[in-house]
Image (cartoon, rainbow, N blue to C red):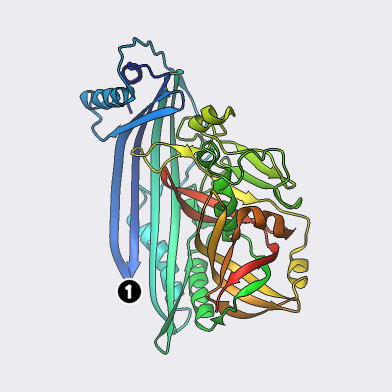
Amino acid sequence: MIKKELLEELLATAMKSGGDFAEVFAEHTRSNGIQFVDGKIDRISDNVLSGVGIRVFKGTRTVYASTSDITRAGLLACARASSDALGEGNAEIAICLKPKTIVNSHPVRIDPVNSDIKTRADILKSACFSASEHSELISQVQGNIAGVTREILVANSEGLLVNDSHTRTRLLVNAIASKFEENQSGACSPGRGMGLEMFDFIDPKEVGIHAARQALVNLGAGYCQAGRMTVAIENGFGGVIFHEACGHSLEATQVGVGMSEMCGKLGQKIANEKITAIDDGTIVGGWGSVNIDDEGNPTQRNVLIENGILKKYMVDRLGSRRMGMPMTGNSRKQDYTFESTSRMTNTFIDNGPDKNEDIIASIEYGLYAKEMGGGSVNPLTGAFNFSVREGYMIRNGKICEPVRGASLIGTGSQILQDIDMVGQNLATGQGVCGSASGSVPTDVGQPLIRVKEITVGGR
């Protein structure tokens, strides 16, 4: 993207005012999408994002500047702006970059960005028509198929020079079921860190049917009663509970400034001994996987909690300086306009010792959260509130009538202690996580788990 000699000049310029570390991040991302609305293809989009960010450190102080002007003059102006913002000085720094080759662990067979529009449109229409044809009560279907290829370059004053490229594909179907002027929705949105070959094992028709079925379930459901009760949370996107309520509290972005309930707890028992939680950016084809993070460090498998014991935080470069801990390959950002921070990749609770049928059978009265929705969390206190997208009551160890309007309310530290059964059907769900460095794709996951008691919001 940028010649080595110019990169060395940019880094030296950024450090002129006395910085002790500088970094250049360059990005060229192409994305496209096809949208389906009201029985037909509604819109086709194709976008390109290109630019450079330059960051300079002085201890734990950082300055970040970015530009879409990638001419030599524009890049040097950006480097001088970051240097001037840090302070005054005229230090002469010699930078010698050593290019490093990265092995691509996520090869793409069918490029979603440059593939034939008809091929992608046929996949999308197959999913959406399957949803609309599933029942006469399905009144509206919307869908989208999207692909993105992101090419990055990272160079820093320690001599690192590395390039990487990563591709993602995602299919989304939203269905609305209607009866007697009442509307309820359902959705399904699988994604992978790969090309269109993801549809070799994900059937677009099943994606549409899943969305329609969920909408119909909610249309026929009564409202959930509120109260304290035992809850079984199903696998896949159920892992959003750990991601939001606990995962963010383990990021150096919060821990490094003392704004997390998990500060100072390394080596302590913070969860039930059945819980082992992992963040793994190396999973081949994972939605949140990358070869390197946005600081140029290889991603890795980080065991965060092992048998209930807190083992590790997720640490970026700034967090490493603040906390005196090694970087873990978790520095990420939405694009070149953001300064990177510590973020999750593919984060999940691992399989446990309990049989899934025993978990349901153990609940005399409670809620079965088959699929979770969105929510919010305060990393400092760990307080969270999440909606249940599809839920059922459990009575005498049996899954019974569907309910809607349920939410789960609690704190991260408490739910880690109250998860007392962990099943064996680990699966992941795809999402987009927002934080200080923008929105990034992340996988969440878990097997079926049981929370012995939690506050359930409802009516």
Q: Amino acid at mark 1?
A: Asp
Q: Residue at x 48, y 75 (%)?
A: 212
Q: Quadrant of the N terminus?
A: top left
Residue bearing the label numbered 1: 38
Which residue is painted at 60% across and 42% down in the image?
280
Residue at x-position 58% and y-position 64%: 409
Q: Is residue 41 above or below residue 392?
A: above
Is residue 163 left or right of 407 when viewed as pictured? left
Residue 422 in view of the camera: no
* Residue farthest toward the bottom in the current orientation of the protein: 180
Where residue 355 appears, as percent x and y from the top left, is 77, 62
- 214 or 21, which lies in front? 21
Label 1 secondary element: loop
Task: Say if 244 sits above or below 291 in the image.
Answer: below
Tell whether 329 sits left or right of 42.
Answer: right
- Up/down of 75 relative to 401, above or below: above
